[in-house]
Amino acid sequence: MKSLSPAGSLLGAVVCLASVVARPLLAQDCPFDANDYTNEAATQIQYARGMADDAGRAPYYQSALESLELAIAADPNDLAALWLFGEAYVGLGDYEAADSMLDRLVELAPGCRSRAEQTRRTGWVTAYNEGIQAFNAGDTSRALEAFETANLIYQDARSFNNVAYIYQQRGELEKAIDAYRTARQVAEEPEPLRAATINLAELLTSNQRAAEAIEIYAEYTESYPDEVLARINYAVLLAQAGERELSREILTELMSREENTFEEWNELGVGLLRVYAVDEAIPIFRRARQLEPYNKDVMANTVDAFVEAGLFGDALPLADTLVKWYPYDAAQYGPLAACFSRTERAGDALMYLQLRESLPFEFQGAHLTRGGGGQYVVRGQLVGRGGSVGATITIPFEFLGRDGEVIASEDLSLLIPPAGVARSFRLQIVSDTPVAGFRYSRGGS
């Protein structure tokens, strides 16, 4: 049976920040009395920002700190010096020291909070972007360190969501739960709040804490009634908790929405399967496939629905396509074998079960995601099964357009790990033509 759906990792694109190098020392809400020390420090900070790399910036920031030490020695409550300390420490990546100085600034002059927040956000952007780059390079330890550093200097739901996601992948569930809760508390925009809410509720549900998840969904869906994925998951949990009348009311209303997106139709079908409404799930998956006929997930969901309904003849062509298009996805072989077995083709069923067992490795969770600028990425895990360990295999991928035409081809080279060892893989293309799906063939050395 399919699980409730998370909202995704929210590990997004690099964040850009408008230039902040020309802020004046004087502002109506935060009046600074500049002096020779702070003016010299401001000049050094400007020089530092003009350098192309960290090695070139560091001496200027250090020179600024020396001037600021003299300013604070003369006046421990020098507001300009405290703010510039924050700027210099952010430039050096010493966010703990920057945090302390900016806290002191706001404590002495509450009107300087917005200026301090602007400095904090500058540091957050730098650390957050380092985290994104490290994650995309496969260094999750460095990514986690960078996102936690970002959280130290400025509270933004995106970095808390990313910390939670990495902890969740590591199995450190209480840390993940705490980070998702914080993300919900500090979220200022709908999408990070949505991701934190759904991922938190899904994590609680998978760890036998469904009552907490129901409370979260009840509060969230009251404020955001148009968030379809949250309402689907809420309805499923209600049904499982015995609140079938309210669950049915929610699902019936969602099925009547003509404006549902492909993702919403697909998730609604999964929700209906979860509450054993398979006869209603099948036409919902058909609605999803009308919009995205070559999406791997909805193809597999449709097969599952047919199989659960006992419609093995209807499932067979699509199940056969899934095995041909995704030959290393071991999970695709079982439904196909079931279809052959129940349509009096026991020999074919046995053959495909034997093929599944003979796979030297398998793909798990391979899926297509869309990014900005025409980027499309296939992500998943390669799991060793004891065959060809240490060999490099090259797997040809094809990316399909909305009419099923091949619009791009790319090879993915992977090192086969030992049995039971999982390694993440990622294949990216850029296409001006919208990509609607992918498939791959058996590879070779």
Image (spheres, rainbow, N blue to C red):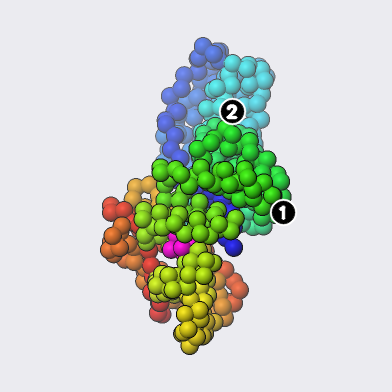
SS at circle 2: helix
Residue 293 among magenta residues: no
Q: Is residue 92 left or right of residue 395?
A: right
Q: Is residue 374 left or right of residue 144?
A: left
Q: Position of residue 182 (x, y in %)?
A: 65, 38
Is 323 drawn above or below residue 284 in the view shown? below
Q: Position of residue 269 (x, y in %)?
A: 50, 55
Disc number placed over residue 208 in the picture, else none: 1
Q: Residues within 10 Å of mark 2 (few under 14, many from 20)?
A: many
Residue at 41%, 44% in the rendered image: 258
SS at circle 1: loop
The quadrant of the image that shows the C terminus is bottom left
Question: Where is residue 224, by image quadrant?
Answer: top right
**Whether label 2 touches label 1, CB < 8 Å:** no
Q: Say if residue 190 shows up in the picture.
A: yes
Q: CA distance from mark 2 to mark 1?
A: 48 Å
The furthest residue to the bottom:
347
Q: Position of residue 96 (x, y in %)?
A: 64, 36
Q: Say if residue 376 shows up in the picture.
A: no
Closer mark to the observer between disc 2 and disc 1: 1
What kind of residue is marked 1?
A: Gln
Per the rendered image, the range of residues in magenta is: 297-302
Residue at 27%, 63% in the rendered image: 405
Relative depth, front residue between 352 and 428? 352
Q: Is residue 238 left or right of residue 40?
A: right
Q: How many marks?
A: 2
Residue at 56%, 51% in the rendered image: 6
What kind of residue is marked 2?
A: Phe
Disc number placed over residue 85 in the picture, else none: 2
